[in-house]
Image: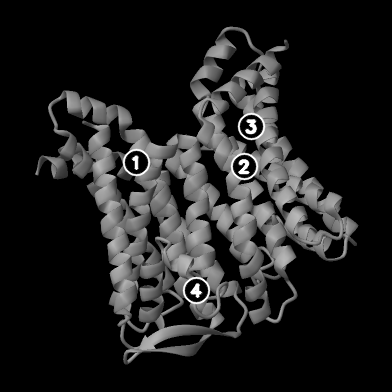
Amino acid sequence: MTPSLAVLASTGRQYARQPINIVLLLVLPPLFVFALAGSLSTFSGVLGGSLGQATGAALGALWAAALLAGSAAFFMLSGTRDPDARLRVSGLGPLALNLAHAAGGVVVACVAGTVGFVMVVATESVASPLDLWVAIMLGAIAYEALGATIAFFIRGDLEGSFLLILVFMLDAFVAGPIGGASGFWPNLFPLHHPSQLVIDAVLHGDLDRTRYLWAAAYTAGLVVVSATVQARGLK
Amino acid sequence: MIAGRVSLLLSRQYARSPLLVALLLVVPAIFLNLAYATTKNVDIRVWVIENGQRLPLAINQPNLHGAIMVPIVAGFLAGVAGLFVMTDARQSDERLRVAGLSGAAVATMRLTMIGVIAAAVALISVAMTLVNFRPENLVGFAAGNLIVSLTYGCIGAIVSVVAGRLGGAYLMLVIPFIDLGIFQDPMFISGDQAPWMKALPGFGGTRFMVDAAFSERADDWTALLIGLLWLAAAAVFTFLVLRRGHA
């Protein structure tokens, strides 16, 4: 077994030792989907918009995956600082450690995103399920990278959570499809384009390729930033 | 008495973190002002109590956003604060018990700390929204937000014991969002809420806050009573859980 796989397996065992973490990862995305399905269409109707129950459900899946992936990355990394330092002292390379942490985060993002996605596809009519899944994963991995980057710069759980909450609330309530933000600055938020992709995937499946490219580039950029700061921290 | 002195002493660790203090000010300031500035200028129907009768009012959406985002911010931050005050406290509380403090005194001390942080979060959020939005009844508006914030501070503390650090973080990021951000928000739920939505912790305080924000008198007494009952139940349960943990 390679060192990265060994670290990943131990992280998984540690995560699984608290079954409530797994239960919540499986229960919370459907709860988000259910909560947003009806209420978002009401809100959109008030504003004369066209967001229906299916798009509300899909946005719920995206937001749940992003929030859970971001918080998991932040708390898993901030909780492993001391063991990581010891592993480095005992000879484990920074690349192996980084790969293991990144893989752990991707697993959480995949599980949270896929559970919400399955819930949406099972209950609503979706024009392009593959595009919907890809858009949810782009948002989840962007938040995973964001959580990991916050964990590098901010030591305290409380401070890191506050920052994650601020970004998420702005993303969901101001820069996203339910906010009225206009101009360039909403583009700077991780879920701005994935949210639009999710809506297009549900409604007609005809996705704007430039938007896809922007969302993918933004997520890739966040992953690179996160990997760079983690690598520097582990030197 | 000793619980008060120790809680004051331990609270200093939070005041010593400039980043935490800055975030406590910056998060509500940025979010509340941006939410107000970017909201579309349309009217939304909101139900309030006027002279004992429940009546609909047409409220400009930026004003409604300015009001409703306050308990959302306060609930989020107070819940997370309640969670991490308790996860951070485990080791030091065990030492305080070894040093002779009773379980009840330690529980009272932690409850006081959570209450002070939750009250600070609520009052800062109220102050920040006043830049753009003036509620009809400021005292009632602040009281409603205080109830929500304190209740969620206690819920965060209970969740820390039940779900631990990561599970607790999952819960305290999701529960306030769904309760306050969706089911208690008149922009998402028009008309009367389903009975089960009224059973959620954010209902009483938020509805009393909405009434105080937009009607001349803050007189939705039923909502206030429900909010206070939730707060009392959350505080008592938190005390019992913490005392049991330190027995």
From the image, state whether disc 3 or disc 1 is nearer to you.
Answer: 1
Chain letter behind tag 3: A
Query: Can you say which quadrant of the picture contains the C terminus of chain B?
Result: top left
Q: Which mark is residue B193?
A: 4
Q: Is residue A192 visible?
A: no
| Kind of residue indicated by mark 3 | Val
Q: Is residue B132 visible?
A: yes
Query: Which residue bears the numbered disc 2?
Result: A26
Counting from the top left corner in percent of width and height, residue B158 is at 35, 44
3 and 2 marks on the same chain:
yes
Say what secondary structure mark 4 lies in: loop
From the image, state whether disc 2 or disc 1 is nearer to you.
Answer: 2
In-image side of A220 versus B80 (left or right): right
Q: What distance separates the C-alpha of mark 3 from that of mark 4?
A: 47 Å
| Kind of residue indicated by mark 4 | Gln
Mark 4 burial class by Cα count in 10 Å: few <14, some 14-19, many 20+ = some
Quarter of the image where one finds residue A206: bottom right
In-image side of A25 versus A61 (left or right): left
Chain letter behind tag 1: B
Counting from the top left corner in percent of width and height, residue A143 is at 65, 45
Q: Which mark is residue A67?
A: none
Chain letter behind tag 2: A
Query: Which residue bears the numbered disc 3?
Result: A229
Residue A231 higher or lower than A203, as above or below: above
* Mark 3 or 2, nearer chain start: 2
Q: What distance separates the C-alpha of mark 4 from that of mark 1?
A: 33 Å
From the image, state whether disc 3 or disc 4 is nearer to you.
Answer: 4
Mark 2 burial class by Cα count in 10 Å: few <14, some 14-19, many 20+ = some
Q: Residue at x 52, y 58 (%)?
A: B177
Chain letter behind tag 4: B
Query: Which residue bears the numbered disc 1?
Result: B85
The one of B13 and A47 positioned closer to us in this rendering: A47
